[in-house]
Image: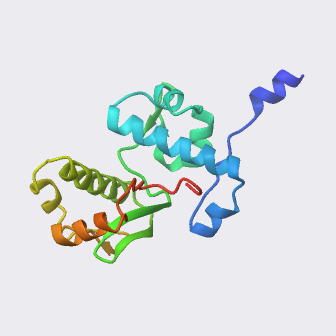
Amino acid sequence: MLNDLRSARVTVYRAIRRYADLQALSPLAQEARARALDAIADARRLGISLSAAAAGAGTTVATVRRYAAPAVERLPSGRYRVTPSDELYRHIRVISTRGVIWVDTWSSREAERASAHANAIKAYGFGDDYDTIAAFAGQQVGGAELETDILALGAMAAAGDLDEVEVYDSTAS
């Protein structure tokens, strides 16, 4: 009887539409959501299956479906596949013309842009050419314009603002 109840359990999608919804989750649920978003990102970036990405992120397909259902589609074969993009809420940090700030976004493409921008700045710090940063000129994430001025980035780095900048909020993903 208990096994029948376990197999009948349905994964219910937990919609997070704003920062307050995210903060309302328990710390364990926030961590589970963060792992689900990591799995989605890994599946897209590495081109691997959802189950492999979920295992790599330390979660399950059921947890990914619970916290990121709009980013997952079921194939006729019964398998799950990650969609090319999604409109899930994310609270992310960007390196903007106003400094390093937190913004809200509902686009996986904007989150990817913020991450690519931060990676370009890191690469420049390790000797890569400026063209990787210049490619972001005039682009925005969450309404904030991405910083591409080398002098401004240098001032942020000197002030310690760019030390270990993580795009995603580790306290509330």
User: Which residue is situated farthest in the right direction here?
Assistant: 1
**Quadrant, the C terminus:** bottom right
User: How many dots with numbers?
Assistant: 0
- Residue 20, horizontal then vertical, whole percent: 63, 69
Give the quadrant of residue 21.
bottom right
* In this view, 169 is above or below 29: below
* In this view, 98 is above or below 95: below
- Residue 22, horizontal then vertical, whole percent: 62, 61
Regarding residue 125, the answer to whether it shows in the image is yes
Give the quadrant of residue 65.
top right
Image position of 131 (left or right of 88): left
Give the quadrant of residue 48.
top left
Q: Which residue is rendered at x = 22% and y = 66% of the image? A: 154
Regarding residue 149, the answer to whether it shows in the image is no
Q: Which residue is rendered at x = 83% and y = 29% of the image? A: 5
* In this view, 91 is above or below 11: below
Q: Which residue is rendered at x = 49% and y = 56% of the image? A: 88
